[in-house]
Amino acid sequence: MASARDTDKSDDALPKGRYSRMADGKNFWWPSKQAPGSAKVRAFRDHWRSLCGDRQMPPRNALDPLDMTALLPHIVLVDVLREPLRFRYRLIGTFVTGLAERDATGRFLDRALYGPALEAMIWPYHQVIESGAPIATLSGVLFADRDWHCVENLFVPFGENDLVELVAICVDIDRDKVRRDLNHGLILDWAQ
């Protein structure tokens, strides 16, 4: 992904204050050539690709939890609602609810749930909807007070006729990094 930004720049080039960067979701996420390191994220990516066949994205009904039982604790399913565009949790795996120390199933991704982290949280969803393609990220935990962890996420679309109806996410902890290693989120090369 080409960008004028260089992830090797010092953080002095970044806007000051983590929450101020998060409030402008697109400026929180910086491109990287790094590939996802999580075996779970890569397995989910490969499973999603197998469901695509010759389509840009698989239809929503192609997603069968029984086909990925080993990954289910790490999976989050988010319904895409339109007019207005909103996101609602359909399912949140036990690994993710344990990390968040709450189950937000049925709730909207909104400021009441995420406060100042909302824009950084929903930016990847918007990218998936606009492009109809996956996006992988690495950042501190944005959805809970677990700042000492870093998580890898792979967001993939499901839908028909170029309309994303559901975003599925695989979430895993990056055990090689801690939050203090990153002052912003990274966009990973999901296809590697």
Image (cartoon, grey):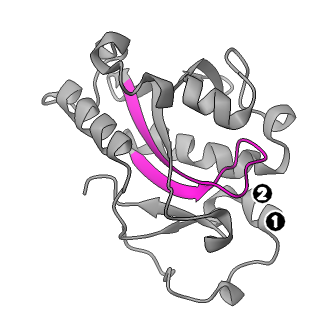
SS assignment at label 1: helix
Mostly what secondary structure, the magenta segment? strand
Read off the residue under disc 1. Answer: 20
Query: In this orientation, which residue lies closer to the viewer: 127 or 136?
Result: 136
Residue in the picture at 28% in, 31% down: 48
Q: Residue 45, percent across and down?
A: 30, 39
Type of amino acid at the residue the image marks with label 2 = Ala
Q: Residue 139, percent across and down?
A: 59, 58
List the single residue furthest toward the front: 175
Q: Which quadrant of the structure image shows residue 180?
A: bottom right
**In the rendering, which numbered label is found on residue 23?**
2
Query: In this orientation, which residue lies closer to the viewer: 33 or 164?
Result: 33
Type of amino acid at the residue the image marks with label 1 = Ser
Residue 61 seen in the figure:
no
Crowd tier of the residue under label 1, counting other residues whose Cα lies within 10 Å: few below 14, some 14–19, many 20 or above: some
Left or right position of 59 against 14: left
Left or right position of 23 against 56: right
Whether the magenta-drawn stretch holds residue 157 is answered as yes
The magenta segment is 135-158
The mark tally for this picture is: 2
